[in-house]
Image (cartoon, rainbow, N blue to C red):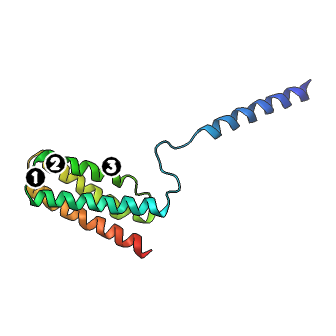
Amino acid sequence: MFFTMKFFLSLIIVTTLGTFATTSSAAGKIENATMEEVTYAIETTLKYAEETLEALNNNADKETILDLLRKTKQIAKEIEVTRLGPPKMKASAQMKKARFAVRKDEMDKAKEHVEAGVKHYQVLRKRFYDF
């Protein structure tokens, strides 16, 4: 009786732990992104950042600039390469500061932040292709 109770208890524990371990996973993360996906994300992010800078230089309206900044932020989330972390974080921080400056109608300040962000995205692209 004692032996069968141990056996069934261990069987229940193993079954329970096994079912919970297989169902848990990180939500929203791109797993094992291919080189093409990362390349597309980097190039598109840089393209949107440069378009934002061009819009600021051409005195575009506030909503257009904010839309371009949003697109840049969304596509930058898809860059999932560890060695690109520091320039990506620096660029994202500059774009965030630019977004706040645009909301406050400080376009000169926003232009400086976007220029810095574009430079960081260019460093990110160079670092990716050099590897």
For disc 2, the marked residue is 64
Q: Decide if residue 92 is on the left or right side of residue 35.
A: left
**From mark 1 to mark 3, how far is it between C-alphas?**
21 Å
For disc 1, the marked residue is 60
Which residue is located at x 29 percent, y 68 percent?
A: 122
Local SS, label 3: helix
> Residue 95's spot in the image, x, y percent?
23, 55
Specify the label residue 74 is tagged with: 3
The crowd level at tag 3 (other Cα within 10 Å; few <14, some 14-19, many 20+) is few
User: Do tag 2 and tag 3 residues touch (Cβ < 8 Å)?
Assistant: no
Which residue is located at x 37 percent, y 52 percent?
A: 77
Local SS, label 1: loop
Q: Is residue 67 above or below residue 87?
A: above
**From mark 2 to mark 3, how far is it between C-alphas?**
15 Å
Point out the frontmost of discs 2 and 3: 2
* Quarter of the N terminus within the rendering: top right
Q: Is residue 88 above or below residue 22?
A: below
Specify the label residue 12 is tagged with: none
Q: Quadrant of residue 80?
A: bottom left
Which residue is located at x 38 percent, y 58 percent?
A: 41
